[in-house]
Image (cartoon, grey):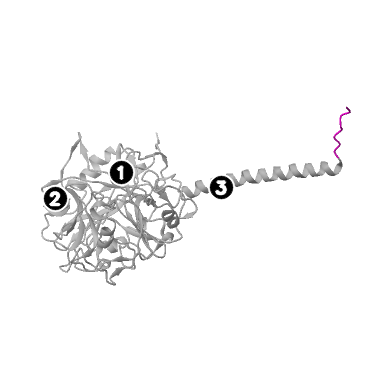
Amino acid sequence: MEKKKFNITKEKGFQIINTLLIVGILSFYMSRLLYFKKKVYNIYSNSSYSFLSKVLVDRIDYSSADRLIENEDGTYTFVGNVNNNYISISGNLYRIISIDSNKNIKIIAEKSITIMPLYEKDIFYNTSISHWLNQSEQEHTGLYERIVKNESYLVENSSCVCQIDNLEEHICTQDLDLNKFGLLSLKEYQAAGGQNSYLNNGERFWLCNRNSENKYYLVNNEGAIGLAFSQSLIIGVRPVLTLCSTTIARSGDGTKENPFTLLQTEIKKVLDAPVGAYIQYADMKWQVESIDENRNVILIMDGIIQQDDDNSPIKFGAYNYITLDSGVGYYLNNEFLEKLEKYEDYLVLKKWTYGTFPYIGEYDYRNSCYGNEIECYVSIPNISFKHLKGNENIYIANNGTQSDELICVIDENLIKFIDINETANVKPVICLNGQILITSGAGTEDDPFVLEVIDND
């Protein structure tokens, strides 16, 4: 039998080519669609380019009691021992507290930024801590606000600061703190689960409410609610702030190891290091305290001066103010300074301020830290400094008017006055040239930034 020839006409050939072309185009676009779908999923799962409030709500785990819950008024609150509400702001770690009806996100510092007294018999937004947090037209305000680099994300922070006497049945009045930065309210602490929640971080810290006797509430080391028992009590300040509804998390999944991050910044110089970051210098570990007006970096030692692995208490000096002629001032700028290699290349000669507490109980930093100054390489912190927590019996550059032989120390969470002939521990502060390069490290306590080696030999 004669085989039948398969003839392809021009018309059929054209149709086959078109079919193959269409299949190819569809295959290409389907593969691209799958690629971008996967990419979008990865971006979304990492919170990149998505509103943070939407990411938080969409991923609620309803099978767990420790989660973000929806309230009757349409707001959301993190409750229990959650572990996926971490966020990094300006290099510091915070916890997400809640989402309000406008999708704004309230957060709180994971650890206390500093320790301060809260003695005033006044509503919170008139206290020295509020002035320390928030910048205003008044002099020496906003010491905390100056370190926050993500201010474009912030909105008015509303917290209930009314007086409370009944912890079980309190209703917030219209007494609200409407500054950018505040403290956690008693109501917010209880709503999260109080002692059995992520807000119980093992530290003592202030709340922004007081009772009818004008004593401020606090959370103790065990997470229980208490009241200030002394005007000299000096405990943790955990700033609370609110991010706007359009806040976008560029990376992270909310865990402590990989917190949500708003901005990715490249750190090349000491000036770029966030406040609170750790820096290794002269075989000692320091923390970034602040950036001064000349773009140099104030560092405070992590811990206290030690010799042979023991604390080294030092007599304050001949006077109740720091001087280069005797005691602490002389030691820091002679014997200790010699231990700081190439200090003239790394350090900046700076004018450090100190002052006087008018009387016992009057511990407003604005009135007691800026009356006098001393120019030197190494000094000690005054009560306005951050990163004072975790140290026992350390000198601060403040004194009292009760006697010209009394100097102040922080010991056992209290401001105390000791005689200038007694000894205490020293926590030095220095000013580092902000242009020095950082060569390695992550800026963490376990992996501090390492400075460029300066060799002028």
Sequence-first tag of 3 and 1: 3
**Classed neighbour count for the residue bearing mark 2: other residues with Cα under 10 Å, few (<14), some (14–19), many (≥20):** some
Q: Residue furthest front?
A: 1
**Classed neighbour count for the residue bearing mark 3: other residues with Cα under 10 Å, few (<14), some (14–19), many (≥20):** few
Pick the front one: 126 or 143: 126
> Which is closer to the viewer, label 3 or label 2?
3
Name the amino acid, label 2. Ala
Q: Is residue 382 left or right of residue 84?
A: left
Quadrant of the rendering where the C terminus is positioned = top left
Q: Which mark is residue 318?
A: 2
Pick the front one: 119 or 193: 193
Sequence-first tag of 1 and 2: 1
**Classed neighbour count for the residue bearing mark 1: other residues with Cα under 10 Å, few (<14), some (14–19), many (≥20):** many
Describe the element under mark 1 as helix, strand or loop: strand
Mark 1–mark 2 Cα distance, whole angstroms, equals 28 Å
> Which is closer to the viewer, label 1 or label 2?
1
Describe the element under mark 3 as helix, strand or loop: helix
Name the amino acid, label 3. Lys
Q: Is residue 2 magenta?
A: yes
Q: Which mark is residue 158?
A: none
Q: Which mark is residue 286?
A: 1
Report x, y in % for residue 19.
75, 44
The image quarter containing residue 351 is: bottom left
Report x, y in % for residue 2.
89, 28
- The boundaries of the magenta stretch are 1-8
